Image (cartoon, helix red, strand yellow):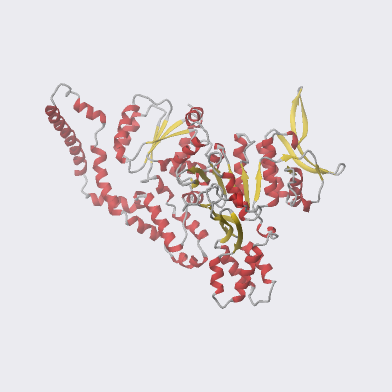
Amino acid sequence: MKLISLKLTNFKKISNIADNTIYLNEDINILVGGNNTGKTSILQAVQKLFGTKNIEPKDLNYLVKNGNLKIEGNVRFSEEEVLAFFEIAKNQFEHQVTNQKIQEIAKEIASNNSHFFEDLTFIERKNAQHSRNKSFSSDILKKYAKSQEQDIYQIIFRASTILNATDFYNIYKSPLYLDSRGNLMEKEKFIPLNEIENQFKNQNNQVNIRGLLYALKKKELDKFKEFKKRLLNVFSELEDVDVIHNEDIGEFELILKEKLRNNGTTEQVTYDIKDVGQGMQSLVLILATILLLKPHIVLMDEPEAHMHPSLISEFVKYLKYLAKDTQFIITSHSLVLMNEVGMDKIFHLKNDVAKKGVVINKIEERNNFLDIIREIGYDIDTLSYIAQPYVLVLVEGESDKKYLLEFAKKANLQKQINVFNIGFVIMGGKNNRHKFLNLLEKLEKNILPIPFVMILDKDETSEENIQKFKAKIANTKNEIYYLEKRQIENYLIDMEAIKRIITKKIKPENQEKWEQINFEKQIIEFCESQKEHIFNNYISDFFANSIFLSTQKMREIFKDTKQKNLQETMDNFAAEFSGELIKITTKKGIELSKNTSSMEDLFNQKWENEKMNRCDGRKLIKNIRFWLETEFQTSFSDQDIIDEMIMPDEITKLLGLLSEFNIKI
């Protein structure tokens, strides 16, 4: 079971606006924002949606006197979970539905979202009327209600009724709430294993860590061994970890063993979990609880509160491992945690006075992340000083930076290539070519305090300018890297990766149509639709890259004009400027006169072999997405492609170059 979306209306400080629906990731979701912006309220809303907490009048937005307090959610069940409800429902009456048909309907429901609904209706904050409903896909229910297959309708209807019952936790497992504020019990008396899962917390907020781990060891030894292995990797000082039932005193014991040097000899020291720091206790508690109870959804309120940065990093790695089966919704103020999970997992909550409440936005652009960092109290200047980059990377645009960081994660190089080790400088595209040329002149004076790498797209400048630039930095520690494709987005056009993604995501009703599609041919058609525009750019770039004059050359033309009148100055400029253009165009003309091909012939030769590289990558991806959404009601994200693709050799080489600067020069 995964929570796909959450819609809140008049709930606490969450505003009643048009975009008040949160579309959640099925793995990890991080809620960030300043204090009192409603992060914990989101966790409470999820608990109330699933009935683990009751909705109350005090949950109503304080600005509302009349109206409804609503918590709505779309939930996706697995086919096995739907079948579990059906198994109960079909035994309540006689029917003629075959098991094969029931499995088909369960699969159909699992591919659609089910609806959960909590509602309080208010009149002047009085006479609050509560309504609750959890039901499988209403579209499917309506479909069979109107059909002749009433037995199927009855099974779905009764299964939806069962879904509303609070005693069916073991089927769909309500969300589990965890935080870092549990107090470790001094001693844990033995209780039967079947009681541990239901009593993992007592009323004093004290936690049975030892009992949880003992039950995990007895019930799922492989998971206990995996947990133990990770714990020993994180805490390198530990030699062994084990949990036992001490039958002499009738208690669980979690034993940590460490070797210490004492007067030239090595001694093994044994101590209990209560003797370690709160950070380690929090980590052990959270992971042991999840591993044993196997919740579908876990809510956590600042779980990293007692963890140091390196422990947070290891914690997130384990979350990613667990997120294959469990969905996490977490509040946090930790910059380390945010950096580890990635921007696409972050939701920003902010008080908006104009909209009279809290607005929630998923982070789309990495530059928005700086605003969040400032809002939660980090000093950007101090942060930049402390984390002085090892190298400056000059790129054309923000997307180059974004994808380089994502590729680094894909290659497991995020420790070497990140926003702390590397200072990204956005240069701008062809419209800012004069900035590039000015920079070229300044770099001769060695004004940069640290090395730099300049990354240029295929369409950014001419080969001639590249060679000039390389000559100027030949005896420095600086580098230039010229991409062989038009834009960095072109490296995402991995047709095999996209096909694999869509094959996994395609809905059953579109499966046959998808299998009949010639995907490669469709992509080529999208490329061909850009050909004329690309050709026009090719002509202009062919000349413009050669005839553009640098600022230095312009100064030389104006050098003798200080004492002359303006008319004479302009006459002199026109003559010298025209002269320079004639020299350059004559040189280019001589080069071209040796080639009997037309511009169109030259372009077509390159186009036939390189159309996938020469087309506009951003536009091509947009066209592919629109086509898939229109024809097959499915799509993919950039992250989907990066996760699925085989890293291109050219990007691997570039990442290797950047990672070499990890050690300060």
Residue 345 place in picture, x, y as percent = 53, 46
User: Is 225 positioned to the left or the right of 136 in the image?
Assistant: right
Q: Nearer the viewer, residue 165 or 609?
A: 165
Residue 299 place in picture, x, y as percent = 62, 48
User: Is 482 positioned to the left or the right of 644 in the image?
Assistant: left
**Which residue is drawn at the image coordinates 25% and 38% (left, top)?**
546
**664 over 607 or under it: above or below:** above
Residue lying farthest right? 248
Q: Nearer the viewer, residue 509 or 66?
A: 66
Number of marks in the image? 0
Residue 327 visible in the displayed image: no
Q: Nearer the viewer, residue 275 or 19?
A: 19
**74 over 346 or under it: above or below:** below
User: Is 134 positioned to the left or the right of 16 in the image?
Assistant: right
Quadrant (top left, top right, bottom left, bottom right) of the N terminus: bottom right
User: Is 580 positioned to the left or the right of 244 in the image?
Assistant: left
Residue 414 place in picture, x, y as percent = 52, 39
**Which residue is drawn at the image coordinates 58% and 43% (left, top)?**
331
**Which residue is drawn at the image coordinates 72% and 43% (left, top)?**
205
**458 over 132 or under it: above or below:** above
Residue 601 place in picture, x, y as percent = 25, 52
Residue 575 visible in the displayed image: yes
* Quarter assignment of residue 458: top left
